[in-house]
Amino acid sequence: GQTVSQWSDPTTGVSFWRYHEQELDATWGYIFPPISGGAAPDDFIGIFQASSSTGYIGNSLGGSMRSNPLLVAWVDGTTPKISSRWAESYSPPSLYTGPRITILGSSGSNSQYQRIVYRCQNCTSWTGGVNGISPNGTHVFGFAYHSVSKPNTPSDINSGLYRHTHAGQYALDVGNARTTSYDDFLKILVNAPPLSG
Ligand code: HEM
């Protein structure tokens, strides 16, 4: 089962819109700032959450794996990591610069689950693929998940990695995920303690 719905994160109280894969008990969540002055801001906050034994969790900002920015996240022990990647074909993605990623508080791992919460700037438009995230209305994102294997060198965001055990797409309404509380949520997340233990 798969659902897209609003979800209040019990750890921080921040309300994300998320795709939830029940079988994997994995979450891909987003919030976007309000559109002001007619120009779409290039910023969003995202969360990846899965069991602590999961290898990695990632997304495609444009739905398809090919020709769109990919983010892949994992924990090295309890240290959260995110790497931005790009692939022109269904083969191991290369490093990709463009997204400015800041890992936010409440990220880490405990005995049950891992979560990587991040701010992604310069992340809503690019050249190639679908060229960007729809500023309003439905947008198709992709997901990728490895149930057991971390990247080969977990400390290194440039590390090689194995092909996902699960991948697919989901549609999420970006307009719904825009919130006037964006700046407040960002503050809460910047200040939240890391997840550990
Ligand atoms: C789909 C290969 C890594 C994101 C696919 C498919 C292949 C493939 C063959 C289509 C069949 C399927 O759904 O499984 C690979 C290989 C990788 C790799 C060889 C080597 C490491 C990644 C990574 C991400 C990613 C790191 C994102 C962080 C996706 C997404 C889809 C997908 C979102 C579903 C949408 C689509 O079919 O384009 N991949 N992948 N892949 N992959 Fe990958």
Image (cartoon, rainbow, N blue to C red):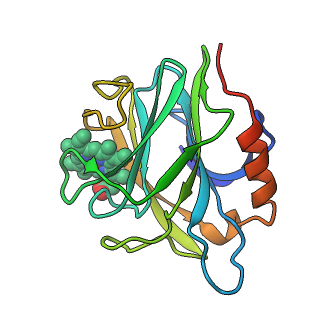
Vertically, is 177 above or below 189? below
| Image quadrant assignment for residue 131 | bottom left
Vertically, is 58 above or below 176? above
Q: How many marks?
A: 0
Vertically, is 60 above or below 167? below
Vertically, is 140 above or below 144? below
Image coordinates of residue 123 in percent, x first then y, are 49, 63
Q: Residue at x 36, y 26 (%)?
A: 150
| Image quadrant assignment for residue 32 | bottom right
Residue 9 in sight here: no
User: Which residue of the protein is positioned furthest toward the bottom in this rendering?
Assistant: 38
Q: Nearer the viewer, residue 156 or 128?
A: 156
Residue 50 in sight here: yes
The C terminus appears in which quarter of the rendering? top right
Image coordinates of residue 110 in percent, x first then y, are 61, 17
Image coordinates of residue 124 in percent, x first then y, are 50, 68
Q: Nearer the viewer, residue 17 or 116?
A: 116
Q: Residue at x 62, y 32 (%)?
A: 107
Q: Residue at x 26, y 37 (%)?
A: 163
| Image quadrant assignment for residue 184 | bottom right
156 left or right of 162 in image: right
Image coordinates of residue 103 in percent, x first then y, are 57, 41
